[in-house]
Image (cartoon, grey):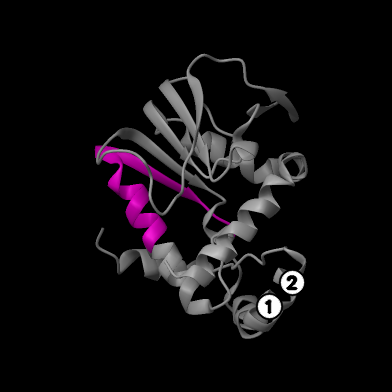
């Protein structure tokens, strides 16, 4: 990774580290999709679980999990992990839940280490100034996440997506808009459009 890209990631790290409380509270505004994912994913989340870029927040059913490892790029993001209970945030009091600082592009784990790997609302935050760089980041993050999944395990991905029309407009203005926001240490996320993302996944061999 270039020095320039490393500096941009450092700014992202600083930004998210300073907005942990706001991030977790903002998730309460998205309870409908969170509850939907909770129901859909419950049968897949079991055994040794890794949550990549967790933000220190559990939004899924861990009843069948042997252990849950919450990771993110800084200690601030995973300190005092919380979960959503009855539409409220509560601190996690579960010996199975642990935290570890980790970079999604270079996870400090051996191949095939986890039964379930979660990448929830993370990929659009791996943004850099150039659109092409965001697709490379997407590719690299998925390869690395898949690498640590056990054979017959599960890689679960949940992402915000745009319609194709909104995505084209967003993409057109993205680079100039990113350069403006990064001056204030506010990295602009890059949202992919849903059908394009499906095609992207289908064309990859991990």
Hey, which quadrant is residue 81 in on the image?
A: top right
> Which residue position is annotated with label 2?
183
- Name the one closer to the observer, 39 or 179: 179
- CA separation in Å, label 2 and label 1: 7 Å
Which element is circle 1 on? helix
Q: Does the magenta stretch include residue 155?
A: yes
Say if 200 sits above or below 158 in the image: below
**Extreme-left residue of the structure:** 151
Measuring 39% from the left and 34% from the top, which residue is drawn there? Answer: 44
Q: Give the range drawn in magenta.
A: 140-160
Left or right of 103 on screen, residue 201: left
Does residue 58 show up? no
**Extreme-front residue of the structure:** 3
On the image, the x and y values in percent for residue 30 come to 71, 46
> Which residue position is annotated with label 1?
179
Disc 2 + disc 1, Cβ < 8 Å: yes
Measuring 50% from the left and 24% from the top, which residue is drawn there? Answer: 98
Say if 107 sits above or below 128 in the image: above
């Amino acid at each position: 990774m270039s020095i320039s890209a490393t500096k941009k990631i450092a700014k992202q790290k600083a930004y998210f580290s300073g907005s942990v409380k706001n991030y977790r509270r903002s998730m309460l505004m998205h309870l409908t999709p969170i509850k939907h994912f909770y129901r859909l994913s419950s049968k897949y989340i079991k055994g040794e679980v890794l949550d990549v870029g967790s933000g220190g927040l559990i939004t899924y059913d861990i009843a069948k999990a042997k252990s849950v490892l919450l990771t993110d790029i800084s200690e601030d993001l995973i300190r005092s992990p919380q979960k959503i209970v009855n539409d409220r945030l509560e601190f996690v009091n579960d010996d199975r839940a642990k935290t570890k600082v980790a970079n999604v592009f270079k996870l400090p784990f051996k191949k095939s280490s986890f039964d379930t790997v979660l990448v929830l609302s993370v990929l659009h935050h791996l943004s850099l100034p150039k659109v092409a760089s965001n697709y490379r980041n997407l590719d690299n993050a998925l390869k690395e996440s898949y690498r640590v999944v056990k054979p017959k395990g599960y890689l679960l991905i949940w992402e915000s997506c745009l319609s194709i029309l909104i995505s084209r407009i967003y993409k057109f203005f993205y680079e100039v808009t990113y350069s403006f926001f990064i001056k204030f240490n506010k990295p602009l996320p890059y949202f992919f459009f849903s059908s394009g993302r499906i095609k992207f996944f289908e064309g990859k061999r991990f």
